Image (cartoon, rainbow, N blue to C red):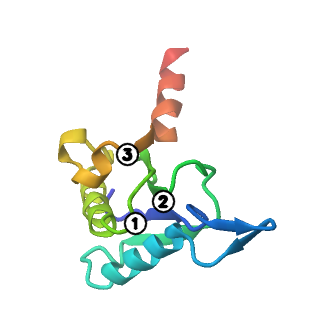
């Protein structure tokens, strides 16, 4: 499991300022992405965990949205992350996600900024495929 690609998606349109239908300036999501990329330069998982900006993750009412994704693991979606205190907590949580074979992130083990900001935990597709095969 640890050899499979892990990805941290960061919404780059989160908490944008809009004027006349166009985005103005830098969004909080872009700021968080830049902070994560900078911190990740010294991170032990920098070559194993892709940090990818995404134009929109459709959680527009939630500023600073991120997701942890990997094959055969649950996907976790977090939102309303404060840009000024979240980057190191996100990388800490990403390390925890990477280390767990199923990607499980127990509430009690998550860094404080991510404890109450979970939007979704989506089970891996492989889990549902196995269940369907056995339920017939």
Query: Between marks 1 and 3, how big is the CA–CA gap?
Result: 13 Å
- For label 2, the residue is 64
The residue depicted at 46 percent of the width and 55 percent of the height is 67
N-terminal label among 1 and 3: 1
Position of residue 109 in the picture relative to residue 116 (left or right) = left
- For label 3, the residue is 117
* Pointer 3 local density, CA inside 10 Å: few below 14, some 14–19, many at least 20: some
Instruction: Provide the secondary structure element on which disc 1 rests.
Output: loop
Label for residue 75? none
* Pointer 2 local density, CA inside 10 Å: few below 14, some 14–19, many at least 20: many
Q: Position of residue 120 (x, y in %)?
A: 46, 40
N-terminal label among 2 and 3: 2
Query: Between marks 2 and 3, how big is the CA–CA gap?
Result: 10 Å
Question: Residues at badges 1 and 2 in contact (C-beta under 8 Å)?
Answer: yes
Label for residue 83? 1
Q: Residue furthest top?
A: 136
Indicate the quadrant containing the N terminus: top left, top right, bottom left or bottom right. bottom left
Q: Position of residue 80 (x, y in %)?
A: 44, 52
Quarter residue 123 falls in: top left
């Amino acid at each position: 499991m640890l050899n499979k690609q892990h990805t941290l998606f960061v919404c780059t349109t989160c908490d944008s300022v809009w004027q006349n239908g166009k985005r103005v300036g830098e969004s909080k999501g872009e700021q968080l992405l830049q902070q994560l990329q900078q911190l990740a330069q010294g991170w032990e998982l920098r070559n194993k965990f892709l940090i990818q900006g995404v134009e929109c993750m459709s959680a527009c009412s939630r500023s600073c949205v991120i997701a942890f994704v990997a094959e055969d693991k649950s996907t976790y979606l977090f939102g309303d992350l404060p840009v000024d205190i979240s980057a190191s907590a996100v990388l800490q949580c990403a390390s925890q996600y990477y280390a767990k074979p199923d990607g499980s992130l127990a509430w009690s083990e998550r860094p404080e900024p991510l404890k109450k900001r979970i939007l979704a935990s989506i089970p891996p597709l492989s889990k549902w495929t196995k269940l369907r095969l056995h339920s017939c």
